[in-house]
Image (cartoon, coloured by chain):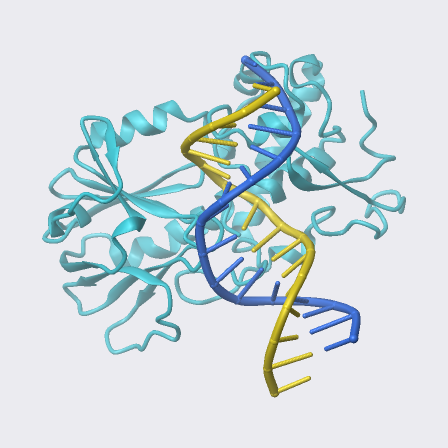
Chain colours: A cyan, B blue, C yellow
Amino acid sequence: MPELPEVEHLRRSLLKPLLGRTIRSATLRRRDVLRLVRDGAESRLARARPADLLAGDRIVTLTRHGKQLAITGSSGRALLVHLGMSGRLVHLDSGRRNANSDHVHALWRLDDASRLLFRDPRRFGGLWALPTPDALEGRWQALGPDALTVTASTLARRLATTSRGLKAALLDQDLIAGLGNIYVDEALFLARLHPLAPASNLTRSDVARLATAIRTILRQAISDGGSTLRDYVDAQGNPGRRQRSHAVYARAGRPCVRCSTTLVGSRVAQRGTVICPQCQLEC
DNA sequence: AACACCGCCTGAGCGC
DNA sequence: TGCGCTCAGGCGGTGT
């Protein structure tokens, strides 16, 4: 399931095939995956013009904030891609057949005869058509700081504003952007913090450890090519390798990699949660 | 404000 | 082999 590392890996893998290319045509197969943003308001079933999907634009930048990926065109329009649980962008070189055309909700044909596909079986993801760079900027400023580069002082300031438990706070994209269930559990384990610890009660050194753990976990996952859970693969169809190195996620009942204590599963903030009861003491 | 809970959606994995 | 069941979860919504 795509979190920040998968989206960043995807972004990097799409730079070469997409940057500078001109989009010949865009096809929206399911209207309800696209939201049109005009004057800050979203409409879900408005009739989109091809230009809303960047048809005719040259692709100028591929950027990311948190789990969101933006493709910006030469017209200044941007297409925001959120992969949700099962979303994928697939780039197919000219002549290459798409292995699975089910659930392809949008596709773009480029000037080198390659294609880009948005496929999302569960449709928890979606596309947002933004009219200007400012509209994109505005949306991203409403989110928390990007988790990949978050500093201890920024994280401390953010966590101080909430009385929630640590895990709930870290999953809140408005507080910090990019963490999902997997990497929150991994980062908390690495930082030896309990998911239910009140977010605003952390000591300075707790937060410093946490910020470092978040950046470390995410950087490692990116260099591993993202997690492979269920059916995650990158834009070229390669699975990630990260699942081999999950320390706690989906490992309830198995021994802690650090102290061999049996890992314990529970539900925190309505999400499956795994901790080491020895390493992550409740405070 | 914080939290629980729900619905969306499909595929994987399980027991039989 | 296949059927029915449960589970997974990002996010936005509602109710407390």
The image shows residue A194 at horizontal and vertical percentages of: 75, 29
Residue located 80% across and 31% down the image: A280
Side (left or right) of A76 relative to A214: left
Side (left or right) of A272 relative to A281: left
Q: Is residue A95 visible?
A: yes
Residue located 13% across and 43% down the image: A74
Side (left or right) of C14 relative to A241: left
Q: Is residue A190 visible?
A: no
Above or below residue A143? Residue A201 is above
* Of residues A229 and A114, the one drawn nearer to the viewer in this rendering: A229
Residue located 27% across and 32% down the image: A136
The quarter of the image holding the C terminus of chain A is: top right
Which corner quadrant of the image does residue A171 belong to? top right
Number of disc labels: 0
Side (left or right) of A217 relative to A38: right
The image shows residue A240 at horizontal and vertical percentages of: 54, 60
Which corner quadrant of the image does residue A37 belong to? top left
